[in-house]
Each structure stands twice: as structure tokens, then as C-alpha cells.
Amino acid sequence: MDTIIPPEEKEDYLLNPVYLPPCEEKSKSKAQPVLTVIGIIFLFLLSAFILFIFVKPHIDMPKYLTTKGFSFSSLLQLSSPVNASALIQVEESIIKAKIDRRQYKGIELGNGIKAVIISDPDSSVGSAAVDIKVGTLADPLEMQGLAHFCEHMVFLESKEYPNLNEMQDKVSKSSGLTNAFTTLLDTNFFFQVSSGAFEETLDIFSHFFIDPIFTEKLMKDEVASVDSEYHRDINNDGWRLRLLFETLANPKSSLAKFSIGSIDSLITKPQSNGVDIVKTLRKFYDCHYSANSMTLAIVDNRPLEELEELTIKTFSKIPNKNVKLPDYSKEVMPFSEGYGNKLVQFIPNDPVRVLALIFNVESESEHPFLEAYEYLAEIISDIGNGSLYDVLSKKGLAHNLAAVKFVEAEPFDLFCIQVVLSDK
């Protein structure tokens, strides 16, 4: 979930029409250095900034999980069938480590949901996560923070389970956990409970996507929670850094938005401009929350056959609206066209000195297994003899050095080289 304050020159953003990225061929832009930031907190940049702002969904499964001709990325491209109760694709040849005792199975339900089910005989807990392919880049200009706010609203009540704390009570009684987060491109919901409570909790969980309740009372209560989250982290250096990026970004880019939301951006300003808050929220949900835009992961100690039956019974009820996934193929690069090549001094709350070189680079989404930037990061981050760090360290100029691709949002990524500087 992202926190940023819109710059002063963007105060009239509520008067502008909603920006919808056109669906055209991906634009080609060469990588170029765009910012030099002095004084950014190293640990915040690597941990708080990445984990809290650009965190990617994590399920307890191997990073190398893939299949012969089958993967989540390819599975997402499958068309959605009409029959909402049958399985239309099953994949059992998922490659795993020889010492991995867990069993894996990839399935697609008749309503278009793609899932990986995992049987872990050694586990005493059950976990599930649902990922929806929509994030803060899809926020309308007149109600910024809507994706994050929708995440909060979805995770409250449903027609089947209308008690506000039903999910939380169930999770607490089994010493489990549950949460959700919104990134640039995704919204993710997850929970973990004891295996004995897994089936009932899974049903409560599924109804957030089957028949959620959006009322004005719930909305007013929950927008206060979003606003509290914003004010809680307003002095966090990770959030301040995100503010810096969104402020400097090209206003035509979807990155240049106030993505966490507040009472001001979600209620006060929209209402003053005649926006129906509940109707807009419901429209956003209907336009993006659909079975064909969801992926699912389930882990439990039940046999695969039983998990498959449970998945079909529980998640086949989610309606398939055949929504069109957000298309950012013609998205404006945030630090191009005069908005890059800047030197910025950032004063952190902690007394550290960090030099960060940030490059706007093309996304690798069309080649997900290439990982060219991962190789580049490994080379730059090397600490062996003759490495960049070795030279700087011996000269007494640096305490640490790292390179990382810390923003991934088609069609652009941000690649960062950062050096923790000495007083010298």
C-alpha cells in the first residue's frame, strides 16, 4: 500500500478526466539515468520501501515453481469458459526440488480462476491467497487512493457472512493471521489458520469476492482507517521517498498519483466535485474484481484430491464478469520527456549518507524468465576483489553497495544502484 502527498501543482487533479492508458503497442524507451538522490536511508530503501510499498505477493512455495508449458504468467492469458463449475485445465507436471515432500497441482476453474493447490503433509496450518490484477495505477484521478480503499472495503463483510468481525474472530481463535495489500499492479488478500479451521475460514474468505457489502456506513468507518494509515506513516522515510518519486514523475504517468488515499482525496474533494462515493467504489469493484482477473494459491495438509474439491466448491461461486485487465502498454514513462536527469537532495530522519542512482528501464514482462536486470544487479553488487565495492571500500568512501530493481510495473521498471557513503 502506497503513501504519497500530491505536489502543489497537481491540486487541480480532481478537475481532470480519468486517465485510462490506451491499448496500443508497447512504446520503446531506452534506459536513462533519471535521479541522483543523496541522503536516502539505505535500509528503508531496501526493506521498508520495497516491502511496504512495492511488495509482491508471497506464498509458501518454491521460487522456482514452474511447469512444462504452464506458469502463472501463461495461465493468466487463458480465456474464461462459460461453465462455472467444472475444471477446464489441470496441470500436474509442476517441477519441484527432489527433497520437497509437498505435492502441487495447477488448475483453472470453469469461471476462469487460475489456482495452484499445494498439499503439505508436514503442515499444521492452512493458508490461502487471492491476487487481483489491479492496483494503484488504475486509480481514477478524481478519487485517488481508490484501489487501496477498495481493498479495505472488500475485506469487511459479505451477504453470506454479514458480521463485521467474522473473519477476524475466526482467525484469532485459531491463532492465525490475515491481511491484504495493494501494489502498483495488484491487490492481494491472504490468511493463515490452523488446519482444523481452514475449510470454514476459506468459505468466509471466498465470500469477500462473491457478495461483498458496500454501504455508506461501512465506507465512512473504513475511510477513517485508510486516513489513519496515511497519517501514521507520513514521517516514515520510505513513504517520504515514495512521495519524492511521485512528485517528480511526469504528471501524465500513472505513477504520479496519491496512491494511499485519505479522507481528503477519497471523500471531501470527490464529494465537492459531485462524485457519488459509494457508486464509484462499486463501479471500481465491478470493473476489476472478477474471476477472470484472479489467481489463487492454497496450502494445507489435506490430500490434493480433497483440496481440489474444496477449491471447486468454494471458489466456483465467484462470478466471471469477463473484465478487461488494465492495459498499460502505452503508459508514459514516469521519468522521461524532461522529467528525468535530476539531482535531488533528500534529508532523512536518520543520520546516514546514501548515494542512489536510479534508472528508468523497460519492463521485462514480455520475457519473464530472462531476468537481465537480476544478472546486472548481481554483477554490480559483487563484493569480491576488484569489484566496485572493493575499490570504494579500500578508498574509505563506502560502507556498503547494492543494486536492485525495486519497481516493477509494465511497461517500466526502476533500477537502483545505491551506495552507503562514509563521512569521507
Image (spheres, grey):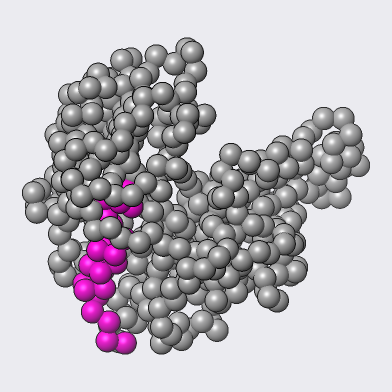
Residue for point 20% across, 23% down:
306
Q: Quadrant of residue 331?
A: bottom right
Which residue range is magenta in the image? 273-294
The residue lying toward the viewer, choosing from 314 and 178, is: 314
- Which quadrant of the figure contains the N terminus? bottom left
- Residue 345 visible? The answer is no
User: Is 287 a magenta residue?
Assistant: yes
How many labels, in total?
Answer: 0
Q: Quadrant of residue 190?
A: top left
Q: Is residue 264 magenta?
A: no
Image-based side of 115 in relation to 398, left or right: left
In x, y percent, where is residue 111? 23, 47
Going 36% across and 24% down the picture, which residue do you hit?
Answer: 92
Near-viewer residue (423 or 391) = 391
Tell me residue 146's x, y (percent). Answer: 34, 67
Whether 160 is drawn above or below 60: the answer is below
- Residue 265 location, x and y as percent? 37, 75
* Image position of 158 with respect to 342: above or below: above
Q: Residue furthest right?
A: 395
Instruction: Give the residue at x 72% y 59%.
Output: 31
In the picture, measured across the screen, residue 53 lies left or right of residue 114, that is: right
Secondary structure mostly seen in magenta is helix
Q: Position of residue 262 (x, y in %)?
A: 36, 69
Q: Vertically, is 367 above or below 305?
A: below
Q: Is residue 358 visible?
A: yes
Quadrant hosting residue 212:
bottom left
Left or right: 86 as drawn, with respect to 89: left
The residue at 27%/55% (across/down) is 290
